[in-house]
Image (spheres, rainbow, N blue to C red):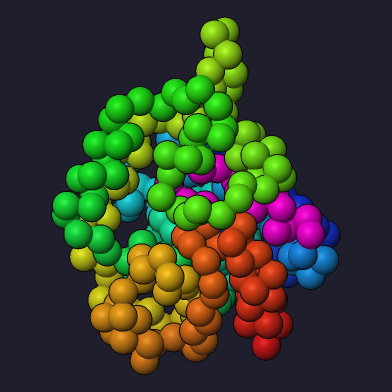
Amino acid sequence: MILERSEWGDPEAPPLVCVHGVGSHAGEFRRVATKRWARRFRVIAFDLRGHGRSGWNPPWTHATCADDLIESVDALGLDRPDWLGFSFGGRLLLDLAARRPEKIGRAVLIEPVIRISPQLAQHRAEQELTGDVWDSVEDFLGSRENTGERKIDPELLTEVGTQFDRLPDGRIKRRTSQAAIVSIFSEFAAPAPPPETLTRPAQLIYAPEFGLVTPEQRAAYEPYLADIVQVPGQHAVFWTAFDETAAAVERFLST
């Protein structure tokens, strides 16, 4: 499937392909692209299958999502671009590195879902089964497990609001296939590709406070990583550690 995309920056600049997290969309990268990365890169972000403006047809497996990304990058005529994946996007980059390393220049893994316990995968999948409608963006953010107790930035409300449609009764509905999200979460309990399949230069950016990337996972992947950066805050690092995350990516990709 050719995925819908958003772009920022000079079309002639070095490409940086960004892959969003589960339940989000390409606009997840708008703020960091327009404020930082579009000065140096042609930032390209796709809506994954089952998300945003891209098709919602099954299958919704990790392998299918990875294939969609390769097909979409090939359609743009990009030869071994740099990639950046956040959360689910980071896990997809591990899959791409194992299956199609020749398609990757460098890879930035930001808070990747390397593997979670079956219990947590079931919990999050069942959360998504309860529905995709909320009273407000504030209500949605309060139900998520990625921003902690910090005060919600008004700009975050505007940014996250682009992921929703307004219903006639005033509530909001996320622009995603809930079936796709449940399917994606179920696969997070399966092992990620072995660390030794990560043969392209790669950077890991993670938030120890949140704990998604475990010490054991870091130790396993560390010999195969070119750079490891710890940032403060929670999973949503583009909001809880914006400057630290943006600068780390720029430094790595400018080396």
Q: Left or right? Give the position of 241 relative to 62.
A: right
- Residue drawn at x 49%, y 35% is 140
- Residue drawn at x 47%, y 40% is 142
Spot the residue most to the bottom. Answer: 223
Tell me, yes or no, if residue 253 can be seen here. Answer: no
Q: Quadrant of residue 160?
A: top right
- Residues rendered magenta in the picture: 20-35
Q: Quadrant of residue 196?
A: bottom left
Q: Is residue 123 above or below residue 38?
A: above
Which is more toward the observer, 118 or 221? 118
- Residue drawn at x 43%, y 44% is 144
Which is more toward the observer, 13 or 222? 222
Spot the residue most to the top. Answer: 168
Question: Where residue 56 appears, x then y in whole percent?
Answer: 42, 30
Residue 29 colored in magenta in the image? yes
Question: Where residue 112 appears, x then y in whole percent?
Answer: 41, 65
Q: Left or right? Give the position of 8 relative to 62.
A: right
Q: Is residue 194 above or below residue 153?
A: below
